[in-house]
Structure formats: C-alpha cells, structure tokens
Image (tube, rainbow, N blue to C red):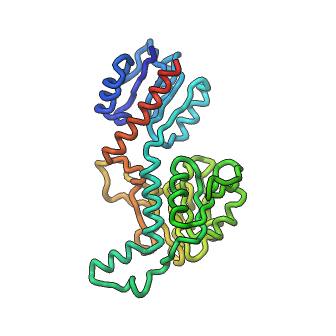
Amino acid sequence: MTQFWVHGVGVLEDEATERLTKRHPDWRFTDGTPLTDAAYDVLVARSPTRELVAASPHLRTLIVPFAGVRQEVRDLLKDFPQVQLRTVHHNAGPTAELAVALVLAAARAIVPADQGMRTGDWTARYVPPNPTMILGGHPALVIGYGEVGRRIARALNGLGMQVHVMRSTEQTGVDGDIRIHPRSELPNLVSRARVVVLAIPGSPATDGLFGADLIGLLPEPSVLVNVARATVVDERALYERLRAGGVAAGLDVWWEEARSADAVTGVTASTYPFHELPNVVLSPHRGGAFSLREVRDLRLDHVDAILTELAQAE
C-alpha cells in the first residue's frame, strides 16, 4: 500500500489533510519528522530537505504543492534521479485573470481616472492620461506559454489582439489563432508589440531575460505586465523607461516582498520609486489569489488528483 507523507506547516492545511484522509480511508498519511525506518513512497513538501528525501528508500515521487519550484529543490533532486518531481497549477486561472486585469488597467489608465473621479475631476475623459491606448487589432506578445501563458494568450486573442507567444524551446508554429515563436525572434516581437506579458517561470535561465536592451525596444504606446518573477526584468532599466513616459506597466511581482502575513507594512518593493509613477499599476504579488478559500480548495483538488493517479498506477 502506498504511503503518503505530508510534511511541513502550511504545505496542506490541517483541514485539507483531514479531507484527503476521509476521501481515501485506505491510504496511509503521516506528518512530521520521518522515522528512522521511513517507508513513504510519496512525499508532499514545499521545501524538502535532503534528510526528507533520503529518509525513505521507497520514495519515488515528490509533490511540491505549488506552481513554482525553488532552484535549490531542483538542485537537490539531481542527486536523486529516481524521484519524480510533480507540481500543481491550481492558481493558473487566477494568475492569468490578474494579468489580463493589469493589461486593461494599465492600457486604459484606469487608476489615474479613478483617482480623478474621487475628487470630481473628469479630465481623463477629455485629455487621456499618457499613455492611454486601445488594444484590438494590435500585436500582443506573451513570453511563456505554460498553463498561465496559454490562458492569457487566449484572453488577449478574445479582445481582438494579434497574439504571439514565445516558449522556452525553439518551437515554432501556430495554436489556433496564436503564433508560436522561438526566442531568437524576441527583439523583433517586442519592438512591434502593444502588449507584452511576462509569464515565464523564474530560473537562472530566465533571470535578466527582459533586460535594458529589450526594455528599450518597447514601442510607444505599449504596456508591459509581469506576473512571472521580478528577477526576469532589469529593475533599473524598467524604472527609467517608465519614468520617461510613453509606456505603461502592471507589476504583480517585486524585487523585495512581504514574506509573512504578520509583517505586511513598511516593506519597500523596489529601490526605485515605482509608486510615484502614474503609468504603473502596482499589485502586491496576489496573482495566485492564494488567500482565497476557493484557491486553497483548488490546490487540494490538484494534489488529490496527483495522489489518485499515483495510487492507480500501482
């Protein structure tokens, strides 16, 4: 019988673990520090240690119950080639929804217009903030075409945009109305895009991908939205480009972030004052909407689906 080991506070809430146990009463779930004679086949852990992975000679699958995996975990698993890594994409929909919201808010200068209306100022109706733009009929570029990127691309296509996407591979082709390009075409695609959305996983391979050269190619007007990782973008170059005007941005990821619900104030997101720029929509890394009960339920469902698949494969 497969033994499942759920490790770490917050990996799956106590209620979620209880629900899994009720759904599968014939399965064995354990929690805590592995025993000397640990025999679990599946480990669920957000930040697994070497001790956890090595404790059970039967371990064949590690489930990280989040969409992203830290590089140190990937490096660790190089020493355990027999262990398969699985993740969940429960927050792909919410993240894509926020990305599209940021595109629209930045493109139509929603925040400055809202702030004006709160003081009785209708200027934005007659003198559009700079930049303000329409999207239909113009090119859009989505960098990253995974679970999140595909949803964003379809949504932008539904707005009438000409959608281009770049994958981490050199793949080319089409996916319906969406055109897939290799990385080598990135400069040309950026220079023509009215909307650029970063939805690529953060990793050493993508750190600094959207550097000063690409930022300098953004046309006027255009919108850059980042729901990937802040490290994908050159912080200083982005700030300077936005301060110069003509380009708007929607940012959900930052170079410094609050790490705990107990310390959510007084955290400076960047060394540069993005908050002073009217052409930037700021969001506190909530693309995955992880504080919503509905999203927690989705995460449980995704983990349950993986566990069920593994159990049925015995």
Q: Quadrant of the N terminus?
A: top left
Question: From this viewpoint, is residue 240 visible?
Answer: no
The part of the image, by quadrant, that contains residue 274 is: bottom left
Q: Which residue sits furthest front? A: 176
Tell me residue 120's x, y (percent): 27, 83
**Number of numbered discs present?**
0
The reply, left or right, for residue 195 in relation to residue 114 is right
Query: Horizontally, is 183 left or right of 133 in the view?
Result: right
Q: Which residue is drawn at 49% across and 18% down?
A: 56
Q: Position of residue 105 (x, y in %)?
A: 43, 68
Q: Does residue 110 lie above or below 234 as drawn?
A: below
Describe residue 110's horizontal placement relative to residue 195 as left or right. left
Residue 232 picture quarter: bottom right
Residue 57 to residue 11: above or below: above
Location of residue 39 in the rendering, given as x and y in whole percent from the top left corner: 46, 15
Q: Residue at x 40, y 69 (%)?
A: 275
Q: What residue do we see at 33% from left, 24% from top?
A: 21
Q: Which residue is drawn at 70% across and 54% down?
A: 182
Residue situated in front as seen by the camera: 184 or 262:
184
> Residue 28: where, in percent of width, then height?
38, 18
Quarter of the figure with residue 114? bottom left
